[in-house]
Amino acid sequence: MNKIRKLSSDIIAKIAAGEVIERPAYAVKELIENAIDAHATAITIHVEESGLRKIQIIDNGEGMSREDLEISFLPHTTSKISDDDELMGIKTLGFRGEALSSIASISNLSIQSRIKKNASGTVVEIRQGRVAHIGSIGMPPGTIVTVDELFSPVPARKKFLKTQKTEFRFITEIILHFALAYPTIHFLLTHNDKTIFDLPVKKDEHQRLSLIFGEDILPDLLPLSFSDSYITLSGHIGKPQTASKNNQRQFLFVNNRAVSDKLISLAIKESFGTLLPSSSSPVFRLHLSLPHEVVDVNVHPRKETVSFTNARMVFDLVKQAVTETLMKNNITYHVDTFVSLKKGETTSVSAQYLKENVLPWNRGDIGQILQTTSFLQIHQTYILAVTKEGILLLDQHAAHERILFQQFTKAFLDEKSGPTSGGKQKNTYTLPKPLTFSFSESEKQLLEEHKNLFEDTGFLFENFGENTFILRNIPSLFKGRNMKKIIRDMLSDLEDQRGIKAIDITSQRMLAFLSCRAAVKANDVLTEKQMGTIVKDLEKSENNSTCPHGRPTRMILPLELIHKYFNRM
Ligand code: ADP
Ligand code: MG
């Protein structure tokens, strides 16, 4: 009897579907899900040209009989749910019966499959949705799905793809998610015949964790485990110092399905309380297991989110588990750069006046009107100086950022235009002690994707095998700063701006990131000499009234206004 059936139109209507394979990584995801649903214990993924030329997934799972194989790639055929099933309580990763048919319609698809009890397998070849060949084939039990020339019938879709390197990174990330969720499955990935990673089933999960997080972070991960009759939580929470600017290193699995969930992220963030500044996101990998009946997986076309029947309870339990983990580990880290800059509207006369009249967007050379060479730091955030016209206030971070942006841009352009690397010598600083980095797979790929940008701005990385890199040179302006943190932050910034293709905007953003990372921060104590340099250098920079992100760098409180306030005029 066939296992695979076509769903009725009733149930099809209930499925949150319309699965569109928009990028090679989504095809890889669907195919791996099928292998896992077939209880494979080893899954090999061969990719060529970031999946556009070839994606091949080989598994040692249950396989399909000839009858099943013949209908598996038709729309809405599945062995995983049936017409009487409620869509709540789905235990398999797939259930819509759509993936193979979607992939078949936009590629040349070949499926070979053999169930154990048969001596040989069956192969079916589909060309743009139509069967071109069916026959017998000798093969071990399991399934081999080969997707050739993805998107060739719909070339327009290729326009929306990122660079091949980026598309390949998406594929890697998806596979690593599976690798974390399924420690008992052997995963092997190759790209253009080169092995990217081989993850045999080992007792310790070290290898998988280091590919996901990067070796350097592992010592700062706290193990978490919690369970009651309703829910089981396990995984790792990063200590506060590992937190990053974005949520790229938050890995959540609900019943072994990689998903994202704003509420759970928030629960974890809240557990950190004041241990983290409001702008940063904790690092975690968290596995939640709870009864399938209370999780609705039929809410997102790519199954990337789920909804819980009792979301509040899940929120509370996660928060409790993370809080306990942090307490147990006696986390006493103090974030020294923490500052909460509230954009408090003030109703004072001076503020109103300033807003309307004298924001010095285009004020001339302040250096000329400086009346003093002494500077005062206010709340370790602002620099105060006296000018002929009144009091000058600078936001130390915004101002320094603008200065560095100008310098970086100049160095960058010099290098681009100059035939020799004369500029490089000047702006690059060779570290007396090179720094070693153990990157996660994704960080490594980001670095390679943006290799030119890093080099053009004065970084020199050397690959030392696998994911280990040695940082030899840095831009001179970074001398003396915490490079480990800066590099990681820059990589996560780069990851954030996935959408951007145009090299110029990317470079510009990179320069803005560089400046932001290198600039003094609020709460950095400055010497008077440093303050003087910032005030003067800002005057020499173009567009100096805002930082590269558009925040004001300075304001002047005019003497007139001060006189007015004291009723002197
Ligand atoms: P779904 O996974 O939602 O059921 P798919 O289109 O991905 O839909 O697959 C259709 C059917 O083909 C599956 O229900 C399953 O029975 C069968 N199938 C697909 N891939 C495999 C595989 N690797 N091993 C065994 N059976 C598979
Ligand atoms: Mg499927």
Image (tube, grey):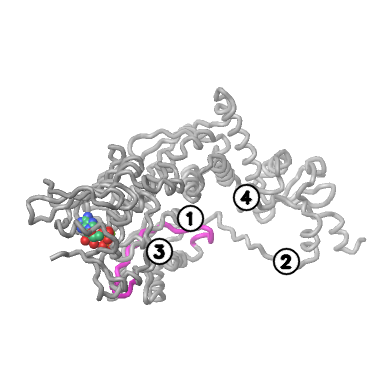
Between discs 2 and 1, the one toward the N terminus: 1
Local crowd at mark 3 within 10 Å, few (<14), some, or many (≥20)? many
Mark 2 or 1: the one toward you:
1
Disc 4 from disc 2: Cα separation: 23 Å
Q: Quadrant of the C terminus?
A: bottom right
The amino acid type, in three-letter code, at marker 2 is Thr
Between discs 1 and 3, the one toward the N terminus: 1
Between discs 3 and 2, the one toward the N terminus: 3
Side of 43 where 510 appears, left or right: right
Closer-to-camera residue (532/537): 537
Q: Is mark 1 within 8 Å of ligand 2?
A: no
Secondary structure beneath dot 3 equals helix
Residues shaded magenta:
275-296
The amino acid type, in three-letter code, at marker 1 is Asn
The amino acid type, in three-letter code, at marker 3 is Leu
Q: Which residue is mark 1?
A: 246
Q: Quadrant of residue 178?
A: bottom left
Mark 4 or 2: the one toward you:
4
- Residue 427 location (% of width, % of height): 57, 31
Disc 3 from disc 4: Cα separation: 35 Å
